[in-house]
């Protein structure tokens, strides 16, 4: 028995390693059937079981819950048509829009291969070469970068998805899960104190709230864009570094998400749950967002590495409300009858399952040249400028500058200067205040 302790661990998630989860349900409150044929959204009042996992992103399993970091917000809907996974964050945008850069980005958030330590110089060295990241950075270094637990933050799909109705009509959608508990964030000082006092602050807060019967909830809204609008919109609607202005596409209520039951066993459920944007249902399709297309491949692949080829057999991942029928067989840890004597090839004349036409995705028309291209010359500074000037209060801006300056300690001078120039392109006041806080020459450019 003494040898078993050495085999009790599975590979840690590369990102989103530390998390907290809970069971609950989703209930439709508004009719959206004219936009999507997804059965779990068919009519007001329809209810679907869910499991939701929150997480930090960059740190390992032992990292404090109050680190400055985006938070994962992943939902598994156990629908009658199979499991539908919404894999999002608590921010509406992301740092990059090209999936080929994702490994590079994550390397900068992990440990220096020479020293084995995290290094903010690596992070800023990467970011100043990716100016589109500064929208997310403006959010991350505000107090929104340290939410007060998981119950008091919003969740977003970040990506655009395609909703298809029974007539085959398409709307692009963005998901917004707005907390009913109200937004609460921590200042850097509060987050640092909690880091010293309670590494598991957010995990404990969620668990104990549900145990007390204070079941947290979120209202699900969507922004809906007709397919015809997307082609000629003022920016690429599949650019994950941009938000859709609510003035153009207001929020439309879908329903209520409630968490009301803690896991019986953390490892069996929260640690082994496996989300992937490939887990979808008829009426909901991925868009051509390049980052989303990359995730369609990478998420199932990492699950097979971490949990094994039959990760969907694990109870928390099992689509228990739908009949599974496919030709996949064998692989480690197959805990089923492996489809018995049924054939494992298709087509066949022996009664094997055939594709259901309702699962067929729509076929959007494409034109152009195939290759690796940039996004052209998008203005990556309009939206962070509006956030800084029009949304943030003066207290918000003061905290933002202080948080950026604190994170930049130890960063090389030439990188600091390049970062200041980008902040100044967003807004001259922004750049000048950062420059003063980190003691570099202030930018001298005309106001934009």
Image (tube, grey):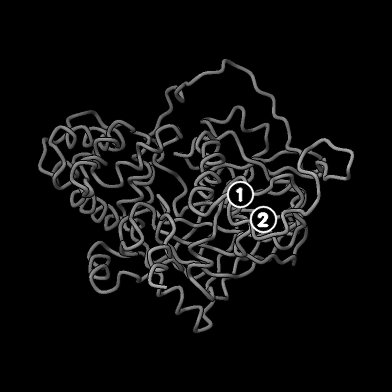
Residue at the disc numbered 2: 83
State left or right for residue 442 relative to residue 134.
left
Which residue does the image show at 67% across and 61% down from the upper left? 78
Residue closer to the observer: 136 or 70: 70
Nearer mark to the viewer, of 2 and 1 = 1
State left or right for residue 410 relative to residue 346.
left
Across and down, in percent, residue 95 comes to 39, 41
As measured in the structure, the alpha-carbon distance from the residue carrying label 2 to the one carrying label 1 is: 21 Å
Q: Earlier in the sequence, mark 2 or mark 1?
A: 2
Crowding near pointer 2: few (<14 within 10 Å), some, many (20+)?
many
Question: In the rendered view, would you say 235 is above or below 43?
Answer: above
Quarter holding residue 203: bottom left
Which residue does the image show at 34% across and 54% down from the upper left? 69
Kindly give the residue lying farthest to the bottom in the view shown.
212
Give SS at disc 1.
loop
Residue closer to the observer: 340 or 117: 340
**Mark number, residue 331:** 1
């Amino acid at each position: 028995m003494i040898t078993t302790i050495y085999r009790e661990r599975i590979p840690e998630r590369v990102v989103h390693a530390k998390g907290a989860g809970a069971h609950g349900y989703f209930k439709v409150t508004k009719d959206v059937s004219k936009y999507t044929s997804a059965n779990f959204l068919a009519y007001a009042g329809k209810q679907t079981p869910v499991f939701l996992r929150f997480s930090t992103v960059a740190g390992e399993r032992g990292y404090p819950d109050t680190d400055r970091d985006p938070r994962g917000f992943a939902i598994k809907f156990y629908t009658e048509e199979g499991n539908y996974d919404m894999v999002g964050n608590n921010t509406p945008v992301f740092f990059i829009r090209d999936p080929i850069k994702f490994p590079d980005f994550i390397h900068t958030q992990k440990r220096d291969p020479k020293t084995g330590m995290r290094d903010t110089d690596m992070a800023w060295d990467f970011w100043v070469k990716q100016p589109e990241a500064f929208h997310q950075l403006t959010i991350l270094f505000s107090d929104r970068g340290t939410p007060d637990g998981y119950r008091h933050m919003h969740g977003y799909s970040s990506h655009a998805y395609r909703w298809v109705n029974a007539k085959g009509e398409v709307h692009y959608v963005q998901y917004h899960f707005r907390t009913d508990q109200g937004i609460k964030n921590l200042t850097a000082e509060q987050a640092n104190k909690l880091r010293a006092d309670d590494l598991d602050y957010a995990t404990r807060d969620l668990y104990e709230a549900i145990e007390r019967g204070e079941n947290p909830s979120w209202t699900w809204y969507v922004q809906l864009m007709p397919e015809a609008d997307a082609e000629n919109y003022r920016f690429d609607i599949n650019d994950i570094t941009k938000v859709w202005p609510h003035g153009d596409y207001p929020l439309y209520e879908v329903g209520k998400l409630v968490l009301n039951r803690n896991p019986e066993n953390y490892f069996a459920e929260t640690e082994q749950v496996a989300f992937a944007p490939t887990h979808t249902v008829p009426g909901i399709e991925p868009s051509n967002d390049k980052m989303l297309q990359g995730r369609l491949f990478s998420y199932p692949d990492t699950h097979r590495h971490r949990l094994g080829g039959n990760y969907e057999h694990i109870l928390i991942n099992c689509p228990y409300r739908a009949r599974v029928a496919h030709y996949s067989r064998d692989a480690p840890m197959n805990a089923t009858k492996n489809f018995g004597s049924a054939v494992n090839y298709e087509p066949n004349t022996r009664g094997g399952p055939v594709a259901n036409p309702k699962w067929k995705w729509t076929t959007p028309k494409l034109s152009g040249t195939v290759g690796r291209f940039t996004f052209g010359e998008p203005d990556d500074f309009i939206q962070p400028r509006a956030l800084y000037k029009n949304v943030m209060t003066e207290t918000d801006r003061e905290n933002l500058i202080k948080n950026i300056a604190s994170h930049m300690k130890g960063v090389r001078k030439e990188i600091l200067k390049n970062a200041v120039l980008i902040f100044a392109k967003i807004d001259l006041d922004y750049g000048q205040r950062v420059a003063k806080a980190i003691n570099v020459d202030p930018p001298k450019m005309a106001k934009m």
